[in-house]
Each structure stands twice: as C-alpha cells, then as structure tokens.
Amino acid sequence: MSHKVTGHIATLVVKVPSAGKLVATGKGLSKASKKSTGASTLTVKLHLTKGEAAFLGKGRTIRQLSAGSQHRSARSTRSS
C-alpha cells in the first residue's frame, strides 16, 4: 500500500487479494470505495479537510487511515 498527497487530494494505491469492495476512510479524510472483480491493485482518491491538508502540508503523514474490504459471497445457482 502506498499514498501520495497533492493539495486536498490523497491518492491511495492498495492491493486486494480477491473480488469485493474496498472502503477507505480516515481522520480528516472523506470516505471512498472501489470494487474489484478479482485480485488486483486499486487506486482510491480521498478528499482532505482543510485542517488535514494543512497538517500534511507541513511534511507529516496521514494520522489515521482505515481500509477494509467486503468480499463478494459465492453466487448460488438455482434450477426450477
């Protein structure tokens, strides 16, 4: 996982192991999500609050970041 901050945008690059939905949020950051169809690398852009952008502008790192995934359940097949 890596991150880059430019102005009021934080860009996260995250590797996910399987299909599902990645949800990322943190202190002073907006909530964003991306879906993947399999193991891949996802790029998520989060908006920073004015205070967090000023904090990071002083060369500091993101204070708190949470990224979790919601894996897609196996599809069931029905026959009538």
Image (cartoon, helix red, strand yellow):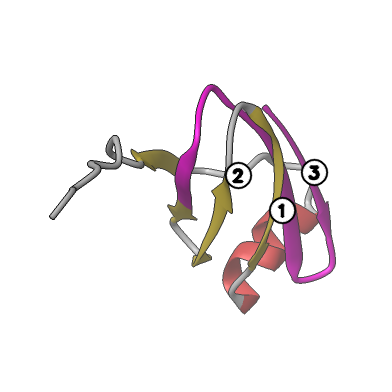
Q: Could you tell me residue 10's position as x and y percent?
A: 72, 57
Instruction: Write the residue at 50% across / 27% down.
Output: 18
From the image, state whether disc 2 or disc 3 is nearer to you. 2
Predominant secondary structure, magenta span = strand
Inspect the image, locate mark 2, and give the three-letter code of the amino acid beneath it.
Answer: Ile
Tag 2's secondary structure?
loop
Which residue is the extreme one toward the right?
6
Location of mark 3 (residue): 59
Residue 37 placement: quadrant: top right
Location of mark 1 (residue): 56
Tag 1's secondary structure?
helix
Please provide the residue range marked out in magenta.
1-23
Q: Crowding at label 1, few (<14), some or many (≥20) Cα neighbours within 10 Å?
A: some
Q: Could you tell me residue 54's position as x and y percent?
A: 71, 66
Instruction: Write the residue at 45% across / 53% down.
Output: 26
**Residue 33 seen:** yes
* Pointer 1 with pointer 3, Cβ within 8 A: yes
Lower sequence index among marks 1 and 2 = 1
Location of mark 2 (residue): 62
Inspect the image, locate mark 3, and give the three-letter code of the amino acid beneath it.
Answer: Gly
The N terminus, quarter of image: top right
Q: Crowding at label 2, few (<14), some or many (≥20) Cα neighbours within 10 Å?
A: some
Q: CA distance from mark 2 to mark 3?
A: 10 Å
Left or right relative to 17: residue 2: right
